[in-house]
Structure formats: C-alpha cells, structure tokens
Image: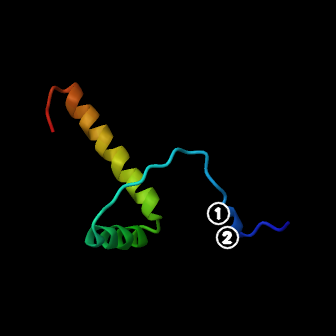
C-alpha cells in the first residue's frame, strides 16, 4: 500500500478529542485566522487554549482573578 500525504493526514490520532459548538461567525473567523497563519483550525484552537491556560495559571499564582 502506498501512503500518500492525504492518507497520512487521515491517520487517526491517539490524542483525546473534545467537541463543542460555536456560532457561524466565530467559525469563519477561526478559519480565516488559521489560513493566515498556515495552521489548521484545530491547531489554532489548541494554541489559544494553551496560551489562555498558561496566563490564568500565572494569574492564579500571583493571586489575581480572571
């Protein structure tokens, strides 16, 4: 079997998955920003969540509230 780039991208990941609903406008904005940054929407959301959690963790350790 020949593995093409498309086949490779379709391989299932072992990472946990989560699903959530957003409005159409936000979805379009995420897609546009992901395109600008040459990322997938999933990768962009992962980056944003990581940055948010790092910031809130830092704020908590300093005694601040979000």
Residue under the image location 26 percent in, 33 percent down? 58
Q: Nearer the viewer, residue 38 or 14?
A: 14
Residue under the image location 39 percent in, 52 percent down? 47
Please, is residue 21 above or below residue 53 in the view?
below
Please, is residue 62 above or below residue 41 in the view?
above
| Residue 30 marker | none
Measure how far apart labels 2 and 1 are at the Cα level: 6 Å
Report if the CB atoms under discs 2 and 1 are less than 8 Å apart: yes
Secondary structure, mark 2, is helix
Please identify the quarter of the rendering in which residue 50 is found. top left
Q: Residue furthest right?
A: 1
Secondary structure, mark 1, is loop
Colour treatment of the image:
rainbow
Please identify the quarter of the rendering in which residue 20 is found. bottom left
Q: Nearer the viewer, residue 48 or 25?
A: 25
The percent position of residue 11, horizontal first and vertical second, equals 67, 58
The percent position of residue 23, horizontal first and vertical second, equals 27, 67
Q: Residues within 10 Å of mark 1 (few under 14, many from 20)?
A: few
The percent position of residue 43, horizontal first and vertical second, equals 45, 57
Instruction: Name the image quarter holding the C terminus.
Output: top left
Please, is residue 30 above or below residue 15 in the view?
below
Horizontally, residue 55 falls left or right of residue 41, namely left
Residue under the image location 20 percent in, 33 percent down? 59
Count of labels in the image: 2
| Residue 6 marker | 2
Residue underneath mark 1: 10
Residue under the image location 35 percent in, 48 percent down? 49
Please identify the quarter of the rendering in which residue 1 is found. bottom right
Please, is residue 20 above or below residue 25 in the view?
above
């Amino acid at each position: 079997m020949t593995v093409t780039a498309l086949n490779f991208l379709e391989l299932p990941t072992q990472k946990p998955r989560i699903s959530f609903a957003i409005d159409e406008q936000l979805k379009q904005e995420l897609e546009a920003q992901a395109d600008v940054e040459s990322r997938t929407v999933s990768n962009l959301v992962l980056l944003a969540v990581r940055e948010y959690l790092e910031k809130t963790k830092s704020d908590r350790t300093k005694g601040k509230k979000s």
